[in-house]
Structures are given as structure tokens and as C-alpha cells.
Amino acid sequence: MSTFKAPKGTYDLLPPDSAKFLAVREAISAPLRNSGYGYIETPGFEAVELFARGVGESTDIVTKEMYAFTTKGGDELALRPEGTASVLRAALEGNLHKAGNLPVKLWYSGSYYRYERPQKGRYRHFSQVGAEAIGAEDPALDAELIILADQAYRSLGLRNFRILLNSLGDKECRPVYRAALQDFLRGLDLDEETRRRIDINPLRVLDDKRAEVQKQLVGAPSLRDYLCDACKAYHEQVRELITAAGVAFEDDEKLVRGLDYYTRTTFEFVHDGLGSQSAVGGGGRYDGLSEMIGGPSLPSVGWALGVDRTVLALEAEGVELELPLATSVFAVPLGDEARRVLFAKVTELRKAGVAADFSYGGKGLKGAMKNANRSGARFTVVAGERDLAEGVVQLKDMESGEQEPVATDEIVAVLKDRLAQTGLS
């Protein structure tokens, strides 16, 4: 046993389970790559102020969950707790919005960090795939992103998820609602910390998950009743476009999400098989975020989907992903000459795109064949001095158990053909 363990609330991705996480990332990003989204990667840490301004100083993320630290040089930095602020910062710094082709469409994948009470589905280190469309105010963009997320989940075989949809209004109508909500909340019996939120961001109180708070929120003013005509029309277009695409959703007028930067469209993907941590992803429109962090006006929309939560959702539904074999061919040399010849053949197979591995460490036949079995390879190539003297190697089908000699100089071509026949290449 090692002296060290992974930090509390984190996890290691190890084979073979790690293959599921890779498959989920691939499935979520595939529709994005097919829809004009380019890949972006940002640092794992940013200036604390970026998140304080963008995510919101009153949010749990900033006040309780951010891993913030001071560097030796005196810089105030934080491990990134979410992706949108970082991606927008990078797009502005790289002047992507000045290239003349708006919206700038970007996707990303990475690890994020929040200091939370660890539980199943909620970790201090977690993985997300996200997408952002920067610089255009268009209900078709909002609909596109919701449809692409739905497409990604369905391609994985997920069925029991729901899409919750709401509008948070804009700078014209939300202040009126905010004032009405504040008046309502001030009449409730709330703890001191929650009362402070009433002045800073009262919509966050609606997002409070505690039963004693939710009970008091019955009868709270509904944002839907305060939406201006422009926001109502915008939201209706989003709803119509999603519906026309055959994507089912539920209107949820209490949906707020935990970040301050959202305006108008907000949505969440939930899976009822995950218990209290039912959200597998979500996002929305954030038209004022660019200005909050010092950029020009760039209306934008995006989402982030949790890789960890998606894997848990797949397990809850009993969905088994079709994963590619880590190894299709395993080579077992018996003797120094066979070692030289088979190593060259393994290299040749890999260059031809075949997943191949080799028995290292000079093991005997019994030990090497155990390794071949553990590798999951469909075919094993075995060769000893007598085989090589006859110009052949032994090809064993690990599924049927059949074994036959194949000319050494033909083995690569034969394996490629056999793998193609079995659908493994």
C-alpha cells in the first residue's frame, strides 16, 4: 500500500472504468464538433476576481466552495470552479470576437474544483464537457445547444432524463421582479445568511434546497408574470424551436440555477435515478457576463454537462456502453528470436491501426497466456523457435479456442482481415 491516498472528495480514474468516462466525453463532444464548435482549453486556475465578478459574490461557489490561494508573488488565484467565465476570458483575451464571425462557438472538457461535502455524485474534483456560443442573441442558438445536449445523451442510450426550462428575464424586466420578490422574502422567517442574500441576489433564495425554506416560498411572486414582451417572445421562440426538433422539456418557473450571470433562457438536465444529486448538467444565456469581466457587450449562451453524473445516470439505467477493445491482438514470444520477430510484428500492427500488445518480462507460456486472457484480446499470436524455423507463427482465436499456423510474413494482413470480419477493426 502507498503511504499516500487521493485527497478527500476526489477520485482516480483507473482502467477499465476510465474507458466509460472517455466514451462519455467523446459522445457529449461529438455533436458539438459536428456543429461548428472549436475546442478550447484554459488553465486550471484563474484570478479569484474573475469568478467573484462573473459567477457572483453571493453564490455558494464563491463564498464557500472556491479553492482560493495566494501565490508566492502575491497573486490571488483560485482553482476553476466552473468553465464559462474562464472560456469567455480566454475568448476576449484572444480577440476571437474580433475575427468577424459571430457567434464564436467553443467546446471544452476538463476538471473543476469545489470545496463541498463529499457524497455520491458530488465531488471536490469533477469533470465536465461544456459548450459556449459567444456574441449573438438568437433563440435558435439557445435551442441548438439544448438539442445538441439531448442528442448527446440519447446517443449514449440515456432515456430517463428530463429537461427543465425557464426564463430569468433581462435587465429591463428582472429589476421589477427582483423588487417584488425582495418584498415577499423580507416577510419570511429566514436565517441571517439567507436574509443577506435578499439584498444581494434574491433569486438565489429560490434555489435554496432546504425543505424549511421551500415551504415558505409557496406563493412567492412568479418571474413569468413579470417578463417583458421581448423576453416572453424570445422564450416562446426557444420553446417552439425545441418542440419542432422533437425534444421534450418541462417548464419550471422556479428554475434559477446557482450562478448569477444567467439571463433569459436557463435550463437543467435532471435524472431521477440519482437521488438528491439529480442534475446531470445545465446552462443558459448570460448576456451581461462579458461586460461584468471588463469586455464589450457579447450576448452569449452555453452549458456544461457533468461526466461523473452522466456515468452514474448510465449505471442507474443499466446502460452498458459499447467500448472499443483496449487490445485486439496479444503477442506471446517464446525465446529471444521470437521476441525480436513478434515485437516487430506488434509494431507493424500498431502502425496499421490495430490495438496490439506484447508479453513483456520474459514470461513462460503459461504466464504469458494468462496475460493474454486478461488483456481481452480477441487473437493471440504465439511463436517459438520451431515455429520460426518453419516460417510460421501460431494464431489463436481466444473466443473459439481454435489455433492454426500462419506464415510469419502474412500474419499482419491475416489479422487485419480477421478483425474486419469480426467487426473489431
Image (spheres, helix red, strand yellow):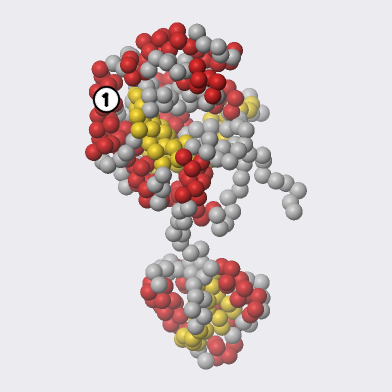
How packed mark 1 is, by other alpha carbons closer than 10 Å (few <14, some 14-19, many 20 or more), is: some
Total labels: the figure holds 1
What residue sits 56% from the left and 83% below the top? 383
Q: Is residue 413 left or right of residue 76?
A: left
Q: What residue does disc 1 label?
A: 234
Q: Is residue 238 left or right of residue 419?
A: left
> In the depicted view, which residue is nearer to us: 276 or 127?
276
Image location of residue 81, percent across then percent down: 53, 32
Image location of residue 43, percent across then percent down: 52, 36
What residue sits 45% from the left and 40% below the top? 271
Image location of residue 244, percent across then percent down: 23, 38
Image location of residue 158, percent across then percent down: 41, 48
What residue sits 49% from the left and 86% below the top? 404
Q: Is residue 344 visible?
A: no
Secondary structure category for the residue under label 1:
helix
Tell me if residue 316 comes above or below residue 122 in the rendering: below
What residue sits 47% from the left and 32% below the top? 86
In which quadrant is the C terminus drawn?
bottom left
Choose top left, top right, bottom left or bottom right for residue 190. Answer: top right
Amino acid type, callout 1: Tyr
Q: Is residue 31 visible?
A: yes
Tell me if residue 140 comes above or below residue 295 in the rendering: below
